[in-house]
Amino acid sequence: MTATIIDGKEVSSKLLESIKKRAKAMKEKPGLAIVLVGNNPASEIYVNFKEKTCKEIGFNCERYNLPEDVSQDELLRIVDDLNQKKSIHGILVQLPLPKQINENLVVDSILPYKDVDGFTPVNLGNLVNDNNVLEPATARACMALIESTGKRIEGKNAVVVGRSSIVGKPVALLLLQKNATVTICHSKTKDLAEHTRNADILVVACGKAKLITKDMVKENAVVIDVGINRVNKKVVGDVDFESVKEVASFLTPVPRGVGPMTIAMLLDNTLMAARRNLR
């Protein structure tokens, strides 16, 4: 058996087309501000893709490139200005930030209804209370890719490897909302394979290249690989793609998997924020 590859680029293109049509029908263009601090090569690539896609679907996109040594006060001032700017409906501060800046403080400074990344305590708290408003974009992307397979989520065993507030915890909560039985694994988990081999749905977001191998995956499982790692100048995921595709029923590749879908969900969040703000 060979897994069906979930093409995130293909799935996301359908959502982007829908977003484009809905945005065109609005009286005012949705506006997204992207703030990039420093010259991290990976962050630069992500921001370029986000800006390009934003413009392609007809959004207003404002990009702010700040030096590596920008002060925390200056960054907070810029975020505050964007909070007040009526033409901006979504604010994205690209992470990670330089060491002199408190990431939590910056994220907390974004108005919750402009927090299109879904990282503020208010939006994460809403997620915990099943009162979803703006959900974390990558977690939304994972769920959309799982649902694209047509596989049932309710009643299934789901295992999430990774417990970050950006992916691991939010995707676990979204799976719970769909009535899956969820286990969260992390660096302190004993015998990781014992848990992953029980997963009907396996989401891996831990940042360790090719951690999940064929022997750790249940036959016919749906496997979502969120990892992005550079190994010998190549981009690979947290899942050993070549071996796992022999046992999984569905598998996302890296690249062309979760990444494109995350951008689409980010822009869908921006559209929702714009609609809410323009009422």
Image (tube, rainbow, N blue to C red):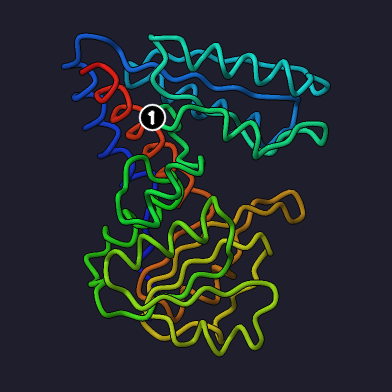
State the SS at label 1: helix
What residue type is disc 1 on?
A: Tyr
Q: Is residue 8 above or below residue 59?
A: below
- Local packing at callout 1 (Cα closer than 10 Å; few below 14, some 14-19, many 20+) is many
On screen, residue 170 versus residue 48, left or right, reads left
Q: Residue furthest left?
A: 25
Q: Is residue 156 above or below residue 89?
A: below
At 45% from the left and 9% from the top, the residue drawn is 85
At 55% from the left and 84% from the top, the residue drawn is 216
On screen, residue 240 versus residue 32, left or right, reads right
Which residue in the protein does label 1 denote?
A: 113
Q: Tell me which corner region of the image, top left, top right, bottom left or bottom right, holds residue 3.
A: bottom left
Q: Where residue 229 appears, x then y in whole percent? A: 67, 54
At 38% from the left and 29% from the top, the residue drawn is 113
On screen, residue 184 versus residue 151, left or right, reads right
Q: Where residue 230 appears, x then y in whole percent? A: 71, 52
Q: Foreground: 245 or 154?
A: 154
Quarter of the image containing the N terminus? bottom left
Q: Tell me which corner region of the image, top left, top right, bottom left or bottom right, holds residue 135.
A: top left
